[in-house]
Image (cartoon, rainbow, N blue to C red):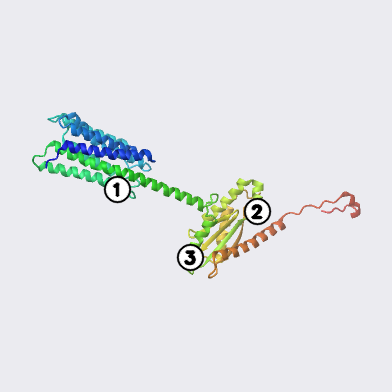
């Protein structure tokens, strides 16, 4: 049964127009990303190319225009992919894409000018198309999401398969007898149509992948906001307990200690330097904890000026040395050491066998309260005593020049 080539081309044009129309409708109704309209436009450009190839069997200019539109498809799709995956360049500037397309058009026009019937030679057009498809495929593999994007891998596979089919058909026509140039041009055009039809589906899939990626990114941001204290960039109370409980469940019989801190006289810092500097003091405590503790240790802000840390595989004595290193690191980051020195009160408890995290924290907080009381008594004892004023009216009663101070 003989296939009527113009009818086949018109049927393909109708199918591609329908697919491009659906893609256009979806892109217009939903959020679409940069580059989407480029590959939608590439499909629409190919539709008139198919129509021209179908009705212009005896019109060489129509065949030349059809070949030009078919050659443009991989480059226009590549232009859209460059915009869609814009975070990393594929290695060559976009200008190279258009220069290669222009060169392919020139080659096709020259072959048409020197052809016997004024139409471009199918072999020349096919060679240019194969080169453009392979070039586009290589650059697509160098986009940043190629290793994780199923749609992008499928597109590259489809383009390479189309180029391979064109090459195989050219090899067949070189030895076959009775294959007309029109049949060769049609087969080569249909390979591009197959890739374009698949691209209409892959374009929707690419947008879906990007939306899922954006959704996961938004969820990560929300999780970060819910779990991390914005001022100190440490886990908040709830997340600290989650992380600590999970770590303790995996520690086995290894020792572990909890350390609780609070900022000594934070109200004094706020009163003397202002609330913004009080926030900076808390921020510096967070920096000191992050920079001093090990990666396996877990630190968090419990609220206000209260902090806690779980030190895995650490005895109470080792925890005290770690706390001393935190205080030394904090001393290097004082905001006003002479008038409002930032210092920490510390409580430490080593977890006993079978003890819960909450129980260890209670023991550490009891030691912290004692440390706070001792620090305040020491500060009160070191403060200068005010002079005692004596009323001049009772000076004679004291005798002579005696003055109380």
Q: Position of residue 292 (x, y in %)?
A: 52, 56
Q: Earlier in the sequence, mark 1 or mark 2?
A: 1
Residue sitting at 27 percent across and 45 percent down? 156
Q: Position of residue 390 (x, y in %)?
A: 85, 51
Numbered badge on residue 281:
none
Q: How many marks?
A: 3
Residue contact at pointers 1 and 2, CB within 8 angstroms:
no
Is 208 above or below relative to 349? above
Q: CA distance from mark 1 to mark 2?
A: 61 Å
- Residue at numbered disc 3: 249
Q: Position of residue 161 (x, y in %)?
A: 22, 46
One can see residue 134 in this view: no
Residue sitting at 65 percent across and 53 percent down? 265
Residue sitting at 22 percent across and 44 percent down? 162
Q: Earlier in the sequence, mark 1 or mark 3?
A: 1
Residue sitting at 43 percent across and 48 percent down? 217
Q: CA distance from mark 1 to mark 3?
A: 42 Å
Horizontally, residue 57 falls left or right of residue 261, namely: left
- Residue at numbered disc 2: 265
Numbered badge on residue 153:
1
Question: Residue lying furthest left in this view?
Answer: 177
One can see residue 19 in this view: yes
SS for dot 2: loop
- Give 323 or 14, whichever is nearer the viewer: 14
Horizontally, residue 22 falls left or right of residue 164, namely: right
Question: Residue lying furthest bottom in this view?
Answer: 353
Q: CA distance from mark 2 to mark 3?
A: 36 Å
Residue contact at pointers 2 and 3, CB within 8 angstroms:
no
């Amino acid at each position: 049964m003989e296939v009527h080539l113009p009818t086949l081309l018109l049927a393909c044009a109708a199918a591609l127009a329908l697919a491009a129309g659906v893609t256009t409708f979806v892109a217009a109704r939903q959020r679409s990303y940069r580059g989407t309209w480029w590959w939608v436009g590439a499909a629409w450009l190919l539709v008139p190319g198919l129509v021209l190839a179908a009705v212009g069997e005896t019109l060489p200019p129509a065949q030349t225009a059809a070949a030009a539109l078919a050659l443009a498809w991989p480059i226009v799709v590549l232009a859209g992919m460059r915009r869609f995956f814009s975070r990393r360049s594929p290695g060559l500037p976009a200008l190279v894409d258009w220069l290669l397309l222009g060169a392919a058009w020139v080659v096709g026009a020259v072959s048409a000018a020197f052809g016997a019937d004024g139409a471009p030679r199918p072999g020349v057009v096919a060679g240019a198309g194969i080169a453009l498809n392979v070039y586009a495929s290589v650059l697509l593999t160098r986009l940043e999401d190629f290793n994780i994007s199923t749609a992008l891998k499928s597109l590259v596979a489809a383009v390479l398969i189309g180029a391979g089919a064109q090459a195989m058909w050219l090899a067949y026509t070189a030895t076959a007898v009775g294959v007309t140039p029109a049949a060769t041009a049609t087969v080569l055009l249909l390979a591009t149509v197959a890739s374009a039809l698949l691209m209409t589906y892959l374009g929707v899939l690419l947008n879906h992948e990007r939306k899922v990626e954006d959704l996961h990114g938004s969820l990560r941001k929300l999780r970060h906001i819910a779990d991390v204290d914005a001022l100190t960039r440490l886990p908040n109370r709830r997340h600290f307990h989650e992380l600590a409980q999970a770590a303790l469940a995996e520690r086995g019989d290894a020792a572990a200690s909890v350390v609780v801190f609070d900022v000594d006289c934070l109200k004094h810092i706020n009163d003397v330097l202002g609330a913004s500097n009080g926030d900076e003091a808390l921020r510096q405590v967070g920096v000191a904890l992050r920079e001093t503790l090990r990666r396996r240790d877990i630190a968090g802000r419990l609220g206000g000026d209260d902090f806690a840390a779980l030190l895995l595989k650490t005895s109470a004595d080792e925890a005290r040395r770690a706390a001393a290193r935190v205080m030394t690191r904090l001393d290097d980051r004082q905001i006003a050491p002479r008038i409002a020195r930032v210092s920490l009160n510390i409580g430490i408890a080593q977890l006993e066998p079978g003890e819960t995290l909450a129980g260890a924290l209670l023991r550490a907080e009891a030691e912290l309260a004692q440390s706070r009381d001792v620090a305040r008594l020491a500060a009160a004892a070191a403060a200068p005593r005010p002079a005692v004023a004596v009323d001049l009216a009772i000076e004679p009663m004291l005798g002579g020049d005696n003055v109380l101070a």
